[in-house]
Amino acid sequence: MSINEAFDHYMASLDWLTRIAVSRDIRVKCGVSPNVLCAWRRGRTKIKPIYVDKINEILGIDLRIHVGK
């Protein structure tokens, strides 16, 4: 599993209202557009390590533990 797949899997596990709030937080703290966030979730654009750290901080989990599984 790639970091993008782990991120998409986690986001899909959230209820819709929480997913909207978390998406907003990620976009604001990472300074990215909704299109970039969508590209990350769909695997069209690789998530850079600096953003992975910020996303992990926002989510309160480490997505990297799922990479390679």
Image (tube, rainbow, N blue to C red):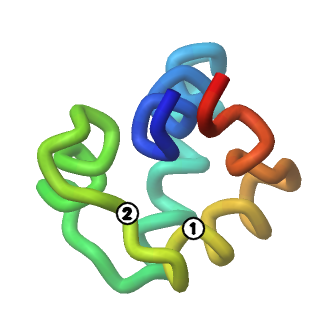
- From the top left corner, tell me how far across and down residue 16 is, in percent: 52, 19
- Three-letter code for the amino acid on which mark 2 is drawn: Ile
Mark 1 and mark 2 lie on one chain; the one further toward the N terminus is 2
Q: 26 or 62: which is nearer to us?
A: 62
In the image, residue 15 above or below residue 32: above
In the image, residue 25 above or below residue 15: below
Q: 10 or 1: which is nearer to us?
A: 1
- Three-letter code for the amino acid on which mark 1 is drawn: Val
Q: Tell whether 54 sits left or right of 5.
A: right
Circle 1 residue: 52
Circle 2 residue: 47
Q: Quadrant of residue 6?
A: top right
The residues bearing labels 1 and 2 have C-alpha atoms spaced at a distance of 6 Å
Instruction: Identify the residue at horizontal 62%, vertical 64% (top origin).
Output: 55
Q: Which secondary structure lies at badge 1?
A: helix
CB atoms at circles 1 and 2 under 8 Å apart? yes
Q: 62 or 11: which is nearer to us?
A: 62
In the image, residue 25 above or below residue 8: below
How packed is label 1: few (under 14 Cα within 10 Å), some, or many (20 or more)? some
- From the top left corner, tell me how far across and down residue 40 is, in percent: 29, 49
The answer to whether one can see residue 24 in this image is yes
Instruction: Identify the residue at horizontal 29%, vertical 54% (top origin).
Output: 37
How packed is label 2: few (under 14 Cα within 10 Å), some, or many (20 or more)? some
Q: Quadrant of the C terminus?
A: top right
